[in-house]
Image (cartoon, helix red, strand yellow):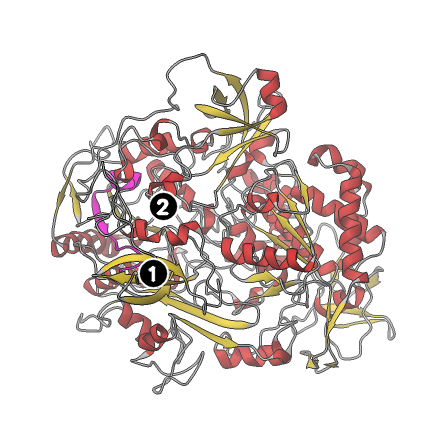
Amino acid sequence: MSPSPSVALSEPVADEVRKTTCYMCACRCGINVHIKDGRIRYIEGNRDHPVNKGVLCAKGSAGIMQHYAPARLRAPLRRVGPRGSGQFEEISWDEALTIATKWLGEVRHRDPKKLAFFTGRDQSQSLTGFWAQQYGTPNYAAHGGFCSVNMAAAGIMTIGGAFWEFGAPDWDRTKLFVMFGVAEDHDSNPIKMGISKLKKRGARFVSVNPVRTGYSAVADNWIGIRPGTDGLLILAVIHELLRARKIDVDYLVRYSNAPWLVVDAPGTADHGLFARDGEGKPMVWETVTERAVPAGTKGAHAALSGRFELADGRFAVPSFQLLAEKYLDPKYAPEAVADETGIAVETIRGLAAEIARVAFEEEIVVEQPWTDMHGERHQGYVGRPVSFHAMRGLSAHSNGFQTTRALHILQVLIGAIDCPGGFRYEPPYPKPLSAHPTPHGRAEHFGSDKPLAGPHLGFPGGPEDLLIDTDGNPARLDKAFSWDAPIAAHGMMHMVIANAHAGDPYPVDVLFLYMANMAWNSSMNTAGTIRMLEDKDPTTGEYRIPKIIYCDAYASEMVAYADLVLPDTTYLERHDCISLLDRPISEPDAVQDAIRWPVLEPDRDVRGFQTVLLDLGARLRLPGFADSLGKPLYKDYADYIVRHERRPGIGPLAGFRGLKGDRAGRGASNPDQLKRYIENGSFFSAHIPMEAQFFKHANQAYQDFAVRMGFFDTPQPVTFQLYQEVLQKFRLSAEGLREPVAPETHRQRILGSFDPLPEWYRPFGEALVDRKEYPYHAITQRPAAMYHSWGSMNAWLRQIHTRNPLYVPGPICDELGLKDGDWAWVTSHHGRIKVEVARTEAVNASTIWTWNAVGKRAGAWALDKDSPEAKKGFLMNHLIADLLPSKEDGMRWSNSDPVTGQAAWYDLRVKIEKAEPGEAISEPHFAAIAQPEPEPHPDVLRYGQEWAR
């Protein structure tokens, strides 16, 4: 067989280069797509793009194979056989939309809550959420509830912002960077670029992670912590800083609620709440006049300790005193937490000492005068050059909310929030909790053929904002914002199918999913979830979940369980909007957003999901999508992006607004806006003036800039919430002292996990099993070359990972006689899997792990049924239960964080034993799933003049 001719490097590879935004992960890098003869020939990074500056990873480069993937769906499908059979018939778009409109219209007229609309890792939630609100169902959310809601909620409730999409380390100035639990595909290009800057400057990089791969492998110090104990380590560091008095007291008094007075009146409805004046302003104790005055009173010298009598006879103490008393307790000393965390005492002390040394002995100053929100003029920005970053390794535990809160409090104590060298906000953040909506979804919020009264997602200000009925029952299908998970700010998508199947709290008529592979790697208890999707009511013979509409670009495992399939385009064939209303591409020094646009027209009968949603909205005559005569308000998603306004002058895109395209943030719609974006490389960037770049939470210039840009209509400064009053309100309800009173069944759970100062408790999935019987932790991590399911069916990326072994620590291998290539049984309290083993020394000694989402069900994604992904790849999900083991009262709680509902993926405990010799196939091994007939494709995909033909 003669090799195919190679393309000479001296010859141009394209007739045209089109600039757009990558979607091979969530970094949203700028890319140049080279096109020749109407086909993509090459994808490279855009050197002018503010996110990646030309850097592109393997995933981004392999977008060419994502676009031409044989797994692409090619036409709308209607199921004609049983669910899971893969028996479909192709139908026209008109027929598909007619069916969808009929199903959705009947539900909206009869009972809109019977529609459950949930989306996966899309980036258009301002549209999908608006659509669901106008439809009138309370049952909407995106993927965040099973990904990282702990990270977002804890950050916003503590400092008014969060890691990653709303903040970043000051890579150019930080001298000590500490990273907790970040997988190597996460924000990969910006983090790699940032770490390279650290290395060039000689700054120290410390990684806290059970597994030493990727970022951790290049860290100066790796701390191989035991999963689920990061909170203990952080609180031990806080203990050491307080003990050594290495905290920034001036910063605390100026920018946090450390001096706010907390009512000390046990047994009353106000105990643990802030003392407030007649206008509701929190009070501080003024040490000169010896009286309580409103926080922020000009010239006041606020106390940080003491117990004071208020004018009404009650007593109160500054919240900082409560914090100091709590964390100076010897139970947080390094000696007390070393065994639990698996980290040596000297390592914990060394980390605390290094944080203190860099923060206070290597202080940096940027000489730029600025004015704070109290009118005080400062001659420069004082920087504590210690920065932190964290992600799913902290958040995906049932104690993750409190752990992440602890990390933010650590940052505040050393004065390292939005200062030179520290963590820095990315616009439109910071925002105080009060700037976010409360969730809507109670019965009074909606009705037949009516929109919801407000947005689905947000932050309850207390139990009074829960979405429950008069009997305390959840209003939402996923039980978000109920007593089960009161602050479920992103919803609880991982519980939707289980609750719908059980009819708890009520059944649904239509399940509408977008890009959410819930029949495989996006669900806990995968085999059980598949059974739920297939299950029928024995009395009626009808499916327990009557109708499922699914939209995806590829033949994932979930497609086979849909009744109606609406095929999406690839990311190179549609418009997308990476908006300030969603999760933009801003940097600390600039306001930025971006678009995708069709660099190629589809060659199949597919349509972009956002345009389809607009079409359905118009057909259903939803307000905001159709006029009074039923005429569509928008031609397609591109038209929506340009003309839609969420508030007067505020639309999906901030750039090139105004009739002349010369306005930013606020301005009239510009019919040439998308053209201007494309000409600019598909992004927009507005530099933040130097006077506004730091201390955004309290900087008058930044707050004025934010109002001009349309983030707020009035300034919204942030006071850091070390002590979280909202949590205390729930504790008072659990004590029976505040209405609505928590049900008896939920009280102990709330009292144990809603401490207004972060507390560590053992993850539930670990605490409720016999840890001697299941001695090891089991976690997953996403590899740099993959992103969720998408990458592991990509012809190029598959050459890096075609299967995923179970990585087992050397001492465990020695004990069990395991060597590379052996097979082992791994058992949890919920299930059992058979997997191939690989020995590793670069891991916490009690932790086994594998790559996430590489394993595939045979027959899915247009892969051969005997592909390595199906025969030797596997999912840890089969071991993870969606419900916790029952307790003494017989109740089984969701396997989630009790505060936010975050899926507790990493609480898993297992045992492992060597398997007897036999067939080298991973188990459970499901029968090959039939899929819709894929596009015709060659047996070999080859880059060159003829590849993918």
Nearest to the observer: residue 559 or residue 615: 559
Q: Residues within 10 Å of mark 2 (few under 14, many from 20)?
A: some
Judge whether residue 456 can be spotted in this image: yes
Q: Quadrant of residue 414?
A: bottom right
Of the image marks 2 and 1, the number of the one nearer the N terminus = 1
Please give the name of the residue rendered at 60% of the width and 50% of the height, measured from the top-left corner.
733
Q: Residues within 10 Å of mark 1 (few under 14, many from 20)?
A: few
* Residue at the far bottom in the pictured view: 660
Say above or below: 354 vs 748: below
* Three-letter residue code for mark 1: Ser
In magenta, the rendered stretch is 556-573
Residue bearing the label numbered 1: 10
Using the numbered discs, state the Cα–Cα distance from disc 2 to disc 1 in whole angstroms: 33 Å
Could you tell me residue 936's position as x and y percent?
17, 43
Please give the name of the residue rendered at 24% of the width and 34% of the height, measured from the top-left corner.
84
Please give the name of the residue rendered at 79% of the width and 48% of the height, measured from the top-left corner.
239
Q: Nearer the viewer, mark 2 or mark 1?
A: 1
Residue bearing the label numbered 2: 790
Could you tell me residue 67's position as x and y percent?
28, 52
Nearest to the observer: residue 541 or residue 29: 29
Could you tell me residue 421's position as x and y percent?
68, 64
* Three-letter residue code for mark 2: Trp
